[in-house]
Every structure is written in structure tokens, then in C-alpha cells.
């Protein structure tokens, strides 16, 4: 039976064959599954459309040009909100995120619908060391800007969001449309008073020989992420009294 409140939302850009594999895996554990094709040029859009023709619980939204992960997620959130959904689990189309974890995340969200359910990656030997080290810096910065409110990982995109809260946040800024989306979303949602639930998730990085595709650009995306944290500092000063009050209220 398909959920009328929670859906899986997959932003997709040139994932190759992994895109169809990811959607099939997600559908094995949940319905409905929506895909936002963000201007792909690798033929994956047509393959996903064909898959959706075979399964009414799959919906494919195609954007004409590539505008970034955050923009694709935002497009899907607006459509989902219009359709009456309240929560969306986001996952990447490259196969790194484990579909078998979808039910547990959705169940956690259903028990605590006011929260965001964040995946905490459990890396194996396939994870590039530079990516693992780099996220430690991002996690530290995110915790500084939320006064250690409970974000265990700021970058991992396997998450369940309350749609109305995230849409409200994204409507207030022209940012959060590319690689800065995941980290800025958890910071701004924390500022808004949305608490985090953290659940461990195994991660698999696929090599090119295994069909792995990565659009991460080390310099471009790290510059964007670093500038985001500096950009948020003035807003953090405004949020400080509220964050301090919440922090003190959690003390025994």
C-alpha cells in the first residue's frame, strides 16, 4: 500500500544505469517514489520514464536544464506538497544510499513527525579518505552554527524532512540550490526549531568499473560549502539568543 504522507524523493543528474537501479531498489521498500531529473543528458531520463510507465507508484519529473541538487529537491518538494504529502525522504540516485534503510527512517519520522531524521554514514573501505576527512570540518562548522543541537552529520543526503518546514526555509533564500543544500538545510531547520533524530546508515562508494558516478568537484563544491558557513554567520548572531535558550532548556 502506498503512503499518503511520506514519499521517497530522488534528485537525479546523469547517474547512468545506477539511476534505474536506485529507483527499483527504493520501490522494493516504499511507495511512492518520485524522481526529479535535473537536466540529465545521459539518456537516464527516458529510462526512468519507461520505468514509471510500468509502475504507477513511480513518478518522474523532468527539468529542462541542470540547476543543482537543491533546486531539484525544491522542485519535488513543491509538487509533493501540492499533492498533499507531508514528509519526503531524500536519497541520491548513484546507488550509495541503502534502500533497505527506507522503512526504518520512515517509521522514525511517523513516530516523531515534527523532526528531521538524519542519516549518519558508516563508511567502509570504499570511501575516499579525502571525502571522509573533509566532512569532519563541515560537521564541526554545522555544530558551531547550531550550538551542538544534535546534528551528527551535515552532508549525508539520506534523510526525511518535514516538507512544510523545509519549503518555508527555502522560500526565504536564493541559496540552498546546489551542493550547499544538505548542510544549509539542517542548519536552517535547526534554527527554525526542528529537532534532529540521527540513525546510522551503511554507505557504499562504487568505482567507475562498477558503474559509479560522482559529480562532486573538490574545489568548486568545497569553496561553495565554506562560503556558505561564512555567509550564515550574520544570521547566526540573530539566532543566538534562541539557540542559547533551547540549549539551556535541555539541561537536566
Image (tube, rainbow, N blue to C red):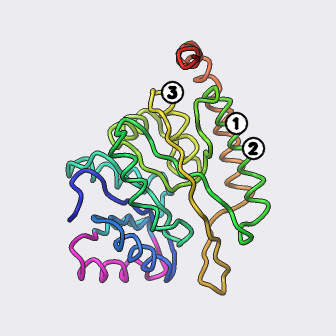
- Which one is nearer the viewer's eye here, 130 or 47? 130
Q: Quadrant of residue 184?
A: top right
Q: Secondary structure at mark 3?
A: helix
Q: Crowding at label 3, few (<14), some or many (≥20) Cα neighbours within 10 Å?
A: many
Is 45 covered by the magenta stretch? yes
Q: Dots 2 and 1: beta carbons under 8 Å?
A: yes
Q: At 37% across and 53% down in the image, what residue appears?
A: 106
Out of 208 and 200, give the one closest to the viewer. 200
Relative to 105, 224 lies left or right: right
Where in the figure is residue 181, as x and y percent of width and height? 53, 47
Residue 29 drawn at (x, y percent): 36, 69
Residue under label 1: 141
For label 1, the SS is helix
Q: Residue at x 24, y 78 (%)?
A: 55
In the drawing, what numbered circle is on residue 164?
A: none
Residue sitting at x 74%, y 70%:
125
In the rendered image, residue 118 lying in the magenta stretch gets the answer no
Distance from disc 1 to disc 3, alpha carbons, whole Å, reads 14 Å
Expressed as whole percent of the image width and height from the top left, the position of residue 62 reads 35, 67
Q: Earlier in the sequence, mark 1 or mark 3?
A: 1
Q: Nearer the viewer, residue 59 or 33?
A: 33
The residue carrying mark 2 is 137
**Rounded to the nearest whole Å, what is the CA distance between mark 2 and mark 1?**
6 Å
Q: Is 30 on the left-hand or right-hand side of 192?
A: left
Q: Is residue 71 above or below residue 187?
A: below
Q: Which dot marks residue 191?
A: 3
- Label 2: state its secondary structure: helix
The span from disc 2 to disc 3 (Cα, nearest Å) is 20 Å
Q: Which residues are magenta?
A: 40-58
Within 10 Å of disc 1 (Cα), the crowding (few <14, some 14-19, many 20+) is some
- Percent across and percent down for residue 251 are 58, 17
Amino acid at each position: 500500500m502506498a503512503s499518503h504522507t511520506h514519499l521517497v524523493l530522488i534528485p537525479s543528474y546523469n547517474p547512468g544505469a545506477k539511476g534505474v537501479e536506485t529507483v527499483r531498489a527504493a520501490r522494493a521498500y516504499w511507495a511512492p517514489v518520485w524522481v526529479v531529473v535535473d537536466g540529465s543528458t545521459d539518456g537516464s531520463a527516458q529510462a526512468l520514464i519507461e520505468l514509471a510507465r510500468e509502475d504507477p507508484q513511480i513518478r518522474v519529473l523532468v527539468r529542462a536544464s541542470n540547476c543543482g541538487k537543491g533546486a531539484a529537491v525544491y522542485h519535488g518538494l513543491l509538487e509533493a506538497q501540492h499533492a498533499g504529502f507531508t514528509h519526503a525522504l531524500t536519497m541520491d540516485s548513484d546507488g550509495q544510499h541503502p534502500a533497505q534503510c527506507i522503512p526504518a527512517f520512515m517509521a522514525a519520522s511517523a513516530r516523531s513527525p515534527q523532526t528531521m531524521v538524519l542519516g549518519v554514514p558508516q563508511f567502509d573501505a570504499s570511501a575516499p579518505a579525502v571525502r571522509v576527512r573533509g566532512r569532519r570540518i563541515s560537521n564541526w562548522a554545522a555544530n558551531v552554527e547550531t550550538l551542538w543541537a544534535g546534528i551528527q552529520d551535515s552532508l549525508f543526503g539520506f534523510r526525511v524532512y518535514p516538507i512544510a518546514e523545509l519549503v518555508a526555509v527555502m522560500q526565504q533564500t536564493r541559496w540552498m540550490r546546489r551542493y550547499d543544500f544538505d548542510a544549509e538545510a539542517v542548519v536552517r531547520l535547526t534554527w527554525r526549531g526542528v529537532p534532529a533524530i540521527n540513525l546510522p546508515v551503511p554507505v557504499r562508494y562504487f568505482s567507475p568499473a562498477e558503474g559509479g558516478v560522482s559529480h562532486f568537484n573538490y574545489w568548486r563544491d568545497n569553496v561553495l560549502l565554506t562560503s556558505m558557513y561564512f555567509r550564515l554567520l550574520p544570521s547566526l548572531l540573530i539566532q543566538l539568543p534562541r539557540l542559547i535558550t533551547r540549549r539551556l532548556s535541555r539541561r537536566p
